Image (cartoon, rainbow, N blue to C red):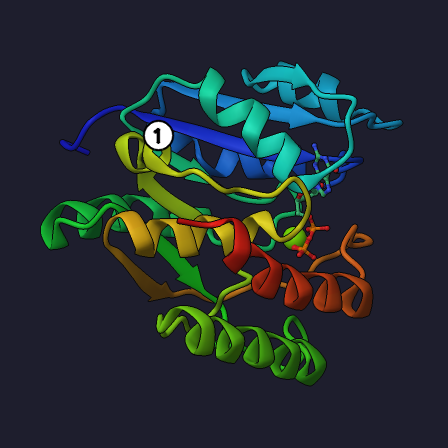
Amino acid sequence: MEQGTLSIIIPTMNEEKTIGQVIDSLSYLSPKEIIVVDTNSKDKTREIAREKGAVVIEEPRRGYGVAYKTGIPRSTGELVLCLDGDGTYPSEIVGTLIELLRINDVDFISCDRMTLRNQNSYTNLHYIGNSVLNLSIFLLYGFHVVDSQSGMWLFRREIYNKMVRLSDGMSFSQDIKIEALIRGTMIEVPIRYGLRITKPKLNTWHDGFANLFAIFTSMVNRR
Ligand SMILES: Nc1nc2c(ncn2[C@@H]2O[C@H](COP(=O)(O)OP(=O)(O)O)[C@@H](O)[C@H]2O)c(=O)[nH]1
Ligand SMILES: [Mg+2]
């Protein structure tokens, strides 16, 4: 890894079953820091993360976006990698993503779960919902995004510092891509998305409609 230092940010809420393995699986990168932003976990998530060498930031305010907005500015690497603590994203691809960021000279890489999806880990309902959100982003912003809801990204700190509108909830995920596309360059890289062995915090219907609404309302506030 030649290109800059790396910070890894992982938001968690009750991920004791998977957080240890996620941190271990990233150790081959020798990152500068691994920051776990935890919101009120009632299990051993924070203890395990600390044991594995991560810095744990306690953020009592709920929200997936809140967690990242707290964690990313506290990190110091030139490159930032974000992913879930639930073990669904492939850590082993990060080294390649760093190479791709450098070779393609882009600001932001988002991992795409759609292209290589399988029925178990990514259902038809997710696929249809995601497609509606992708289409809405295309209609409103003119950006073609394959997986607007993916939660694994690698980006340069400079591009994050230019972003102006990032929401506090689950729609942070589509916001960060829209912001990257408006203010810099983004590519998507297909990944194999794994099965979540524990309960998701996201509610497919509720968060799906909330995100659709957010795409439209965000147009008003942005630019
Ligand atoms: N700190 C924090 N983490 C959260 C919150 N909501 C979700 N997460 C974490 O963010 C990641 C994504 O949530 P997840 O339920 O996996 O969403 P999905 O991948 O879209 O189904 C997981 O690691 C969750 O534990 C929150 O309000 N605060
Ligand atoms: Mg997840």
Quadrant for residue 102, please give it.
top left
Q: How many marks?
A: 1
Q: Please, what is the three-letter code of the amino acid marked with disc 1?
A: Asn
* Ligand 1 under 8 Å from disc 1 Cβ: no
* Left or right: residue 158 compared with residue 149: left
The residue singled out by tag 1 in the image is 161
Q: Find residue 36 and report its horizontal and vertical position in percent.
A: 60, 25
Q: Position of residue 71 (x, y in %)?
A: 54, 24
Kindly identify the residue that appears in the image at 35 percent across and 73 percent down. Answer: 142
Q: Position of residue 20 (x, y in %)?
A: 63, 32
Give the answer, above or below, for where 106 lies relative to 157.
below
Q: x%, y% of residue 45? A: 75, 27
The one of 86 and 205 positioned closer to us in this rendering: 205
* Left or right side of 118 for 185: left
Which residue is painted at 63% across and 16% down in the image? 56
Ligand 1 sits in quadrant: top right
Whether residue 118 can be seen here = no
